[in-house]
Image: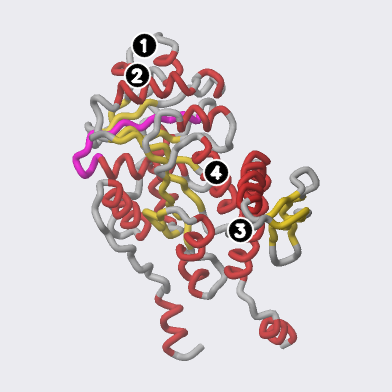
Amino acid sequence: MSEVIVVTSGKGGVGKSTTTANLGVGLAMRGQKVVLIDTDTGLRNLDLLLGLENRIMYDLVDVIEGRVEIRKALVRHKKFENLQLLPTSQVKDKSAVNPADLMALCDELRKEYDYVIIDCPAGIEQGFQTAIAGADTAIVVTMPEVSAVRDADKIIGELGRSEKDNIKLIINRIRPAMVDSGEMMDMDDINDILAIKCIGQVPDDIKVVTSANRGEPVVGDNDSQAGKAYANIVGRIMGEDIPFMEFEKEGFFAKLKKAFGM
Amino acid sequence: MLDSLMRIFNSEKSGKVAKKRLQMVLIQDRANVSPEVMELIRDEIIQVISKYMVIDKTDMELSLENDDDSVALVANIPVHNMKHHR
């Protein structure tokens, strides 16, 4: 049974592409056949996060417009050959692909892959409608900040209107120390507000940035809290029942301070 | 010193403030999105009340009103008569 998943958020900058890259690599590490589709036409980025920016020959728009077969446009991951990327065009705009086109493409790809994961552009305009068209499941990425949560709610409403009812939530860039001191909403708060099943909470982690710098998603890096969190999300997507992990909240100095009652 | 006193009086943490504010604004957002839904609510309220009362459907008013810390569905439904029930 293959699954087409769209990763969306409404607000930009909450980590859609980072999430897509990590889920893709994570699922591939678990032996799944995965294809990632970047639909943020004009703002190509998924290639960079996966370290595949120098291997692109063709793009999504070439495939949609019939210039090249899907097979030829897919870029194989360097390390995981069961992971492929269909990059988007860096020159065209979002009107170059319409919902029917993408739906047809997803149906074609689902014959061969276990997971088709679509990286959605920010916003709720045509690019969003196109990206969600062929999806069975939507993963909404948000952050514990008021604007990101409000936009997530808007996106959830839009998904409902498009009869996409299988919606899951990932809360990204949580700062456990702030949650601890009551200065940031936690997973329960956001669950109360959005009432969507949460499949992951990812802490803010410098390794997300350093791994993006190298084009190697952090998933599976067990020295990284975010890497572990992404690996857990991958397991949950595959149907495993994995409890939410406790974050390591404090560094050495914070512990020392506490020990001395400071 | 003054700063820490202020902090004690202004004791609600920003995480809780964020949650409360979002819960309020989202009621408005969700309601704002679709006049169609308001119309559906209106029609169903009319159906239910009409079982028991004769009401003036044209003069009926239904709206979402918000104060600082609450949102209320306010209905003004003129009643002409009660219906008799066995």
Tags 1 and 2 touching, CB below 8 Å: yes
> Quarter of the image holding residue B79?
bottom right
Disc 4 marks which residue? A157
* Chain assignment, label 3: B
Disc 2 marks which residue? A73
Q: Which residue is situated farthest in the left direction here?
A: A31
Q: Amino acid at mark 2?
A: Ala
Q: Earlier in the sequence, mark 1 or mark 2?
A: 1
Q: Judge the density around disc 2: few (<14), some (14-19), many (≥20) Cα neighbours within 10 Å.
A: many
Residue B39, relative to residue A193: is it above or below?
above
Q: Amino acid at mark 1?
A: Val
Q: Amino acid at mark 4?
A: Gly
Q: Amino acid at mark 3?
A: His
Q: Earlier in the sequence, mark 4 or mark 2?
A: 2
Percent of width and height locating residue A16: 46, 43
Going 59% across and 31% down the picture, which residue do you hit?
A125
Specify start and end residues of the magenta stretch as a single range.
A28-40
Tell me the SS state at disc 2.
Answer: helix
Asked if badges 4 and 2 are on one and the same chain, I answer yes
Residue A117 on the magenta span: no
